Amino acid sequence: MVQGIIAGGDVALRRSIEGEEDKPESGARAVREQQLTPQDVIVGIASSGRTPYVIGALKQAHAIGTTTVFLCCVPPPEELKGWVTHFITPIVGPEIITGSTRLKSGTATKLVLNMLTTVSMIKLGKVYNNLMVDVHASNSKLVARSIRIVQAVTGIGIETAEAALTQANGQAKLAIVMLAKGLNVTDANALLEKHSGFLRHILD
């Protein structure tokens, strides 16, 4: 659902591969390899607004018909406006260490990406009020969180929440529907599917 592409591939997360970001054709090739469609959205990230790899990727995506977003920390370059659908431009000003965009620009970029992914998950029905109801209890920390979420939404005791969560195979959203509507696992699952996984449509 959310995929990351970086110039130089995954190894560039551990070891700097500086020259690769200067190749627009590599960015274009990466987009073709992802087999993007017009139903997808691509976010190009370049603090300077000039990175050739990112520009090459966005141009290729635009040619496919994919929605393109350009995230940069400078005013958007005029020449990009013909093939970028949306610009997100947090203007952070000069870095305290000249050229070290890992400081203000990197921090601003991380905040924007947090907003984009969080809002996307909300719009997909994975959140109810301020609760991550689509959590799957796969370890002890998430089991405890899931129990608290089920309790918060339904108002039931901890033992009942634990039992429902067990029946729901660790799926908090499913356990909530079972308890709130008095349904078994199969019927609660069918109700969730009918409402495309949106808990609000069922409870409200």
Image (tube, rainbow, N blue to C red):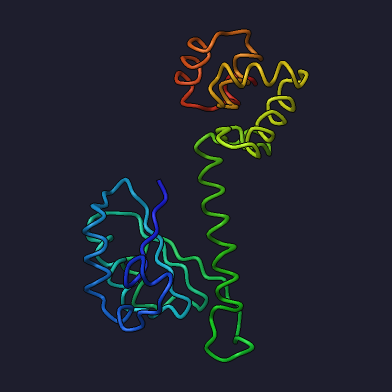
Left or right? Give the position of 33 relative to 12: left
In the rendered image, the vertical position of residue 6 relative to residue 204, given as above or below: below
Q: Quadrant of the C terminus?
A: top right
Q: Nearer the viewer, residue 10 or 102?
A: 10
Left or right? Give the position of 152 relative to 52: right
The residue under the point 43% across, 72% down is 14
Considering every residue shown, the one lying at the far front of the view is 140
Left or right? Give the position of 180 relative to 69: right
Q: Nearer the viewer, residue 158 or 172?
A: 158
Indicate the position of residue 112 as horizontal and vertical percent values: 56, 62
Considering every residue shown, the one lying at the far bottom of the view is 98
The residue under the point 49% across, 17% down is 189
- How many discs appear? 0
The residue under the point 24% across, 72% down is 26
Q: Quadrant of the N terminus?
A: top left
In the rendered image, the vertical position of residue 114 relative to residue 9, given as above or below: above
Indicate the position of residue 144 as horizontal and vertical percent values: 69, 33
Q: Nearer the viewer, residue 76 or 24?
A: 24
Instruction: Say whether residue 134 is visible.
Output: no
Indicate the position of residue 180 as horizontal and vertical percent values: 66, 14
Question: In which image quadrant can residue 69 be found?
Answer: bottom left
In the rendered image, the vertical position of residue 37 relative to residue 9, given as above or below: above
Instruction: Say whether residue 31 is visible.
Output: yes
The residue under the point 50% across, 15% down is 191
In the rendered image, the vertical position of residue 64 relative to residue 110, given as above or below: above
Left or right? Give the position of 6 relative to 202: left
Indicate the position of residue 37 as horizontal and vertical percent values: 26, 49
